[in-house]
Amino acid sequence: MNAIVIGGDGFIGSHIVDQLLELGHKVTVFDRCPYQVTRNLEHQKGAINVISGEFANKIDLKNALYGNDIVFHCVWTSTPISSWNNPYLEVDENIRLSIQLADAAVESGIKKIVFPSSGGTVYGAQHNSRVNESCLPSPFSPYGIAKLAVEHFLNYYRKSANLACDIYRIGNAFGPRQPVSSPQGVISVWMSKILSGEKIIVYGDHETLRDYVYVKDISYLMAYSLADLNESATVNIGSGRGTSIIELLDVFKRVVDIPFQYEIKSRRASDNKSFILDSSLILSYFPNFSFSNLEEKIRETWQYFREEK
Amino acid sequence: MNAIVIGGDGFIGSHIVDQLLELGHKVTVFDRCPYQVTRNLEHQKGAINVISGEFANKIDLKNALYGNDIVFHCVWTSTPISSWNNPYLEVDENIRLSIQLADAAVESGIKKIVFPSSGGTVYGAQHNSRVNESCLPSPFSPYGIAKLAVEHFLNYYRKSANLACDIYRIGNAFGPRQPVSSPQGVISVWMSKILSGEKIIVYGDHETLRDYVYVKDISYLMAYSLADLNESATVNIGSGRGTSIIELLDVFKRVVDIPFQYEIKSRRASDNKSFILDSSLILSYFPNFSFSNLEEKIRETWQYFREEK
């Protein structure tokens, strides 16, 4: 199958590229990549077709999309925290350009679009138990509002233009290649700060539960989208385990082999109190799969960040 | 109380103005109104303060909002049908400018924003029984997607800037002053066509149920927002009665006193199959209220359109 990953040189995108190649597909990466130099895909050089282009440029996009069967939409220009003071950016960039990508996909004969959405921000804060896909979304950060709006616009393209779409509502992704310049994901933020000798800030308490999910588990499960290019689905990807921010700190104390300082503060307005995903739906398609051990993967991620530094 | 109605010269907006004046409030109307000439509020001349301005101009908006306690957001530039081929307009105009209005309201010291959303398009097509406010929204027209996104952005302003918001998910509104130039609402569309001697097209069958609600019932119930400017709510306003498109045609045959032709066709892609709203929540605040008789109000609306023509 011919697959293109928009933002394929990024965090989740590059792991999807690895997975697609592992499964034997022909992969094109569309990203900024000046002079074809990638940040995260040096190890796949030669195995992938790299197209440098601007996500905002529909002509660039269409040229790249043509000839592919499926597109993975892995570009997003904000984080939940950065979105908090800039709702306009969500509208002008993330919602608008996602619509444009869907449009370009339809015009280029793509059969399916795959969108990594956000479990934590789309469902919002009102849920006390594990949330499944039929729970009422209640986003309150502009980031989550925009992710949900894009989900809905993809459903519109499914209905109006027969573009199949798979939407993955993902937990707190972590792992190698997570960017530290625009911080999203407490694990990479903490590791980056520790490596810079900065104190880490722990926002929350024993009740601030998150569903941390290893990025390679995510890319493995997202291969579900390749099974049938005519089917559409909205599915959670989370470990189903709640880890409090204090437990995470304890893991760091065991894993991180250099001294670090921390300070515990209250949750920020943009933070959920707690959320854990019910991933029964996607797991029903992968009966032999089990999620990675959190501490083990945090240890691997720490090794990665140490070596990168 | 000082209230401002943005788009107050329009269909629902002008009925809200009537209701606010009835209740003794001080009302400002912000609309295009060239030379202060209104379309729908000639009968209130002298009783209202009319400000001509462009909804897209934040400075105009802020100047108008200042000194008011509550703002009613009654501007929308599309219909479900017109949105079907123009999702970008929903993003660039309706979502973006609604955010700008909320921003301007916060900066002007407004306490609450009131937003007429859309029951029919926000809940989408998957519901078989009456939908209440805890049902899962599943919009599929760009119009409905944008209405829901604006609901969510208003919740963001509630949380981030303490701007209270009331959201009304309204059924198929009908009544005097519904515009016929940008057709929304089958009742006004049919009346307009009949008066022009055109054949009316009946899209659907006995199973194409809609929840028709008289505009003056809507404006009466929306006065709920004045009770407490610090409280926020999302509530349905629909009659709770399902009327099929064929039953509606039968009502027209009884009410319309001139001959007309019709043709029955299948539903369009942008149409819901069926929807009826459960309005128990808002009715619990108005124990003595009952919704108007449909046939009687269609008769009144027909008289209005005949006289206007």
Image (tube, coloured by chain):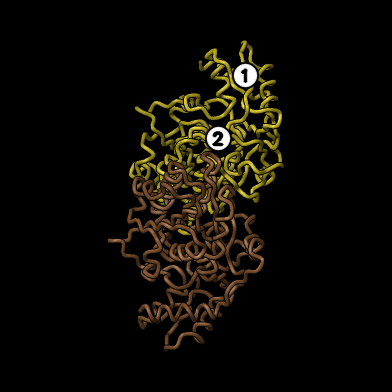
Chain colours: A yellow, B brown
Q: Is residue A10 above or below residue B128?
A: above
Between disc 2 and disc 1, whose residue precedes? 2
Q: Name the residue under label 2.
A: A19
At which x and y percent is residue A259? 62, 10
Q: Which residue is drawn at 35% across and 56% down?
A: B51
Q: Are marks 2 and 1 on the same chain?
A: yes
Q: Please give the chain letter of the residue carrying mark 1.
A: A
- Say what secondary structure mark 1 lies in: strand
Single out the mark in the foreground, 2 or 1.
1
- Say what secondary structure mark 2 lies in: helix
* Residue B134, quarter of picture: bottom right
Inspect this view and state whether residue A49 appears. yes
Q: Name the residue under label 1.
A: A263
Q: Which residue is drawn at 40% across and 63% down?
A: B47
Q: Please give the chain letter of the residue carrying mark 2.
A: A
At which x and y percent is residue B265? 48, 76
At which x and y percent is residue B303? 44, 81
Foreground residue among A132 and A70: A132
Q: In this view, does A306 lie above or below B79?
A: above
- Type of the residue with mark 2: Gln
At which x and y percent is residue B185? 46, 70
Q: Which residue is drawn at 52% across and 26% down?
A: A177
Inspect this view and state whether residue A68 appears. no
Mark 1 Cα shell of 10 Å, populated few (<14), some (14-19), many (≥20): few
Q: In this view, does B83 lie above or below B106?
A: below
Answer left or right for B128 relative to B184: right
Foreground residue among A21 and A200: A200
Answer left or right for A220 relative to A3: right
Question: Farthest left residue?
Answer: B35
- Type of the residue with mark 1: Glu
